[in-house]
Image: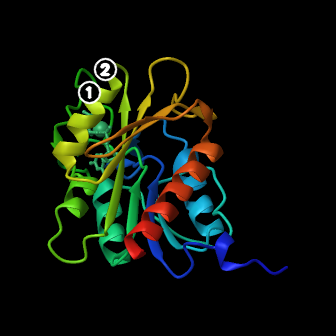
């Protein structure tokens, strides 16, 4: 049925969302990963698409279906996630909800590492590129609104503000992953929206509700920019 533009305030705007874990290969059959379900990022992609945005979802491995109206690019490693994000630019807003592995295995073995009597393999790690910081620091094609997450277990607002400054992004959604809400894989999330000059305490709500609240805030941001 007919929906007026009031219900599609993000119509025609391109947006990028990252979601899920990354898998960092050890050898052809093994990897390092984390417990991210991808639920929050997928919900954000869906909520933005519902408001009319053209969404590219760069996703690590998850068990989730691609939301209706969203274009998904599936990747495994952090390096591939960065390349897929750069390929999706230019966009007007980018939301980095992925739980990117901080480290990868420095020298991936191209053959399966065999078990040998009395010998343990040792893995040395290298730091992954910071996708949020890299996109935030771009000279060309920097999205006008760059949003990151901060998963914290203590002094959430303080750590979130430090992350906002360090990453050079515009907003941070800081969430408490240490108290039973917002735990990886859970359904609810309690977040603070931090900007350079404000702190909002959002109520504990479902990840879908967090996503809708964020999509509405993003629509309001672009309304104000355009006004
Ligand atoms: N992020 C990213 N690329 C990375 C690491 C993190 O894009 N290599 C993004 C995440 O998607 C998130 C934000 O940066 O939006 C913060 O991630 P987080 O893991 O909380 O921050 P780190 O800087 O990795 O710090 P730490 O894990 O030590 O708390
Ligand atoms: Ca991290």
The one nearer the camera, 131 or 227, is 227
The one nearer the camera, 6 or 110, is 6
User: Is the C-beta of the residue carrying label 2 under 8 Å from the nearest atom of ligand 1?
Assistant: no
Q: Is residue 93 left or right of residue 83?
A: right
Q: Is residue 105 visible?
A: no
Structural crowding at the residue carrying mark 1, measured as other residues with C-alpha within 10 Å and reported as few (<14), some (14–19) or many (≥20) = few
**How far, Cα to Cα, is label 2 from label 1?**
6 Å
Which image quadrant shows ligand 2? top left
Q: Residue at x 32, y 28 (%)?
A: 157
Q: Which residue is mark 2?
A: 155
The one nearer the camera, 119 or 52, is 52
Q: Quadrant of the N terminus?
A: bottom right
Q: Quadrant of residue 160?
A: top left
- Residue 179 horizontal/vertical position (percent): 49, 17
Q: Quadrant of the C terminus?
A: bottom left
Q: Quadrant of residue 194?
A: top left
Q: Is residue 22 left or right of residue 105?
A: right
- Residue 44 horizontal/vertical position (percent): 55, 55
Q: Are marks 2 and 1 in contact (CB under 8 Å)?
A: yes
Q: Residue at x 38, y 75 (%)?
A: 91
SS at mark 2 in the image: loop
Q: Residue at x 24, y 26 (%)?
A: 120
* Figure label count: 2
Q: Is residue 12 visible?
A: yes
* Residue 158 marker: 1
Q: Is residue 123 left or right of residue 94?
A: left
- Residue 19 horizontal/vertical position (percent): 47, 53
């Amino acid at each position: 049925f007919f929906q007026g533009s009031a219900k599609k305030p993000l119509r025609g705007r391109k947006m990028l969302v990252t979601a899920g874990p990354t898998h960092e290969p050890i050898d052809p059959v093994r990897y390092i990963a984390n417990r991210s379900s991808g639920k929050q990022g997928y919900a954000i992609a869906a909520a933005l698409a519902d408001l009319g945005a053209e969404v590219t979802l760069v996703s690590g491995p998850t068990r989730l279906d691609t939301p209706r109206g969203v274009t998904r690019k599936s990747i495994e490693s952090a390096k591939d996630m960065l390349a897929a994000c750069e390929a999706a630019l230019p966009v007007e807003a980018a939301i980095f909800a992925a739980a990117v592995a901080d480290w990868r295995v420095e020298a991936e073995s191209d053959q399966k590492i065999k078990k040998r009597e009395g010998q343990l393999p040792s893995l040395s790690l290298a730091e992954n590129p910071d996708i949020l910081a890299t996109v935030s620091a771009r000279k060309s094609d920097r999205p006008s609104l760059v949003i990151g997450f901060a998963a914290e277990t203590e002094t959430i607002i303080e750590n979130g503000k430090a992350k906002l400054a360090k990453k050079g992004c515009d907003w941070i959604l800081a969430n408490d992953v240490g108290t039973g809400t917002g735990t990886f894989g859970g359904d609810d999330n309690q977040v603070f929206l931090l900007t350079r000059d404000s702190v909002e305490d959002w109520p504990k709500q479902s990840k879908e509700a967090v996503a809708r609240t964020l999509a509405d805030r993003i629509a309001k941001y672009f309304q104000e920019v355009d006004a």
